Image: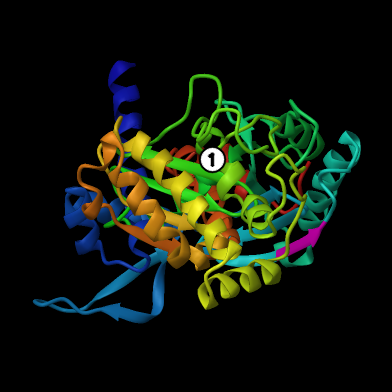
């Protein structure tokens, strides 16, 4: 009995390694998989044959990988029709849902605006349920069962990835989105912090830069952070953790949209930059939403001449810099990705940010700290959610080779 269990565990592990190698590299040869996994060629050959017969992998039809020695080898690739997953993104006044095939390509998507701050609790939940239902009914799904839904949301989620605990986009708290959607659609669901999903996406997109330790900072209407330490996404014991934007920059300072005062976000969020650029009182109620065109115009004015617009970006850089410097006093300096529409104005933020970091205990090596910018926030959010969903399918369903689960993946209608 024990030997049988060990054999099953080994088989599952080896299948997972082969699938992971193909997902990581796209089209790849069996020889390249052997180099990455250290599995024998005979083991890889047997596993890949099984995965092809099960409709999980496919041999590339028109591409061959030429080796330095010997005959060319046919590439292995993920079979797009093997599964479908769904991502849902809920942020300030915005909701989007996307269906993706097993290779990570978009099958269908929908996005629209809504007033998240003013919506009653049941209406907000209803909008999320409705958009999921529409995507499940989308004919482009072609009858394939959705095996996983990942919902990314601005704010704090619980550590078990089941609920939104608090979010600045809505006055409502403690919404158990995963339970609600699972009861409605009988599809496994997780609820994730949006910045954590950005970090997941960055690691898949550029594993050389974003590997063991790195930080993703959201520069948008709000300020958020996804933190990876020693290769693991940082989360708290009870919550998603990483609420960088609500660390205190100035005690009893400017009013933040969270209701407290002096947060980093109250100086660096879009509404804060707008408030300072317009010389409004720092106690003024934060504006709910500011268009990207308005923020671009503000940045253009700051580049054009010295004035309140440039000073507003300087204050934003200072707040972000002191926050990062304090973080680097606890951990070693790490690569930072600035994500979101306002990352396009990083040239206005960076000088004050670097100066502030250098004035902190964590800034002894401030010149070695590197920054990248990723303005397309939605693409990263969707990508991180997709990889969260697809790797679940890889490891928990297809690697296990569970016949019942495989039947569900191939099934044509949901229960």
Residue 50 x %, y %: 39, 52
Side of 243 where 74 appears, left or right: left
Disc 1 designates what residue? Answer: 264
Q: Position of residue 193 (x, y in %)?
A: 58, 39
* Residue shown at the point (36%, 46%) measured from the top left: 356
Image-quadrant location for residue 31: bottom left
What residue lies at 60% left-to-right and 26% top-to-bottom? 158
User: Relative to 68, does residue 373 appear above or below in the rendering?
Assistant: above
- Queried whether the magenta region covers residue 354, the answer comes back as no
Q: Is residue 251 visible?
A: yes
The C terminus, quarter of image: top right
Percent position of residue 328, x then y: 31, 37
Q: Which stretch did the figure color magenta?
A: 109-113
| Residue 186 sits in quarter | top right
Is residue 17 positioned above or below 63 on the image? above
Q: In which quarter of the image is the N terminus?
A: top left
Res. 203 in view:
no
Q: How many labels does the image show?
A: 1
Secondary element under disc 1, as helix, strand or loop, is loop
Which quarter of the picture shows residue 185?
top right
Nearest the eye: 126 or 410 = 126
User: What residue appears at the point 59 percent right and 38 percent down from the top-left corner?
Assistant: 192
Residue shown at 51% from the left, 30% from the top? 241
Taking the image as shown, residue 66 lies to the left or right of residue 265, namely: left
């Amino acid at each position: 009995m024990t030997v049988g269990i060990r054999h099953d565990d080994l088989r599952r592990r080896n299948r997972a390694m082969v699938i992971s190698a193909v997902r990581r590299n796209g089209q790849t040869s069996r020889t390249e998989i052997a180099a990455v996994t250290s599995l024998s060629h005979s083991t890889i050959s047997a596993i890949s044959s099984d995965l092809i017969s099960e409709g999980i992998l496919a041999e590339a039809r028109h591409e061959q990988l030429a080796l330095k020695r010997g005959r060319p080898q046919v590439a292995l690739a993920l079979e797009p029709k093997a599964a479908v997953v769904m991502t849902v993104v809920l942020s300030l006044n915005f909701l989007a849902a996307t269906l993706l095939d097993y290779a990570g390509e978009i099958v269908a998507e929908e996005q629209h605006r809504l007033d998240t701050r003013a919506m009653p609790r049941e209406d907000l939940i209803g909008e999320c349920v409705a958009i999921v239902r529409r995507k499940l009914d989308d004919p482009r799904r072609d009858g394939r069962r959705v095996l996983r839904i990942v919902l990314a949301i601005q704010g704090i989620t619980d550590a078990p990835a089941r609920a939104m605990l608090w979010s600045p986009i809505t006055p409502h708290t403690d919404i158990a989105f995963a339970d609600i959607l699972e009861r409605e659609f009988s599809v496994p669901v997780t609820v994730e912090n949006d910045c954590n999903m950005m970090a997941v996406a960055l690691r898949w997109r550029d594993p050389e830069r974003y590997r063991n330790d790195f930080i993703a900072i959201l520069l948008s209407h709000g300020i958020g952070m996804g933190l990876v330490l020693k290769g693991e996404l940082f989360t708290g014991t009870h919550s998603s953790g990483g609420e960088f934007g609500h660390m205190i920059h100035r005690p009893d300072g400017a009013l933040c949209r969270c209701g407290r005062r002096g947060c980093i976000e109250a100086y660096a969020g879009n509404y804060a930059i707008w408030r300072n650029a317009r010389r409004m009182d720092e106690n003024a109620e934060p504006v709910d939403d500011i268009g990207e065109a308005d923020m671009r115009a503000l940045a253009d004015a700051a580049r054009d001449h010295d004035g309140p617009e440039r000073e507003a970006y300087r204050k934003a850089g200072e707040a972000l810099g002191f926050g990062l410097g304090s973080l680097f006093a606890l951990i070693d300096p790490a690569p930072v990705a600035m994500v979101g529409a306002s990352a396009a104005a990083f040239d206005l933020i960076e000088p004050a940010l670097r100066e502030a970091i250098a004035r902190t205990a964590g800034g002894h090596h401030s010149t070695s700290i590197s920054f990248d910018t990723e303005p397309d926030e939605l693409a990263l959010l969707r990508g991180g959610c997709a990889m969260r969903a697809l790797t679940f399918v890889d490891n928990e369903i297809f690697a296990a080779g569970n016949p019942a689960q495989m039947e569900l993946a191939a099934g044509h209608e949901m229960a």
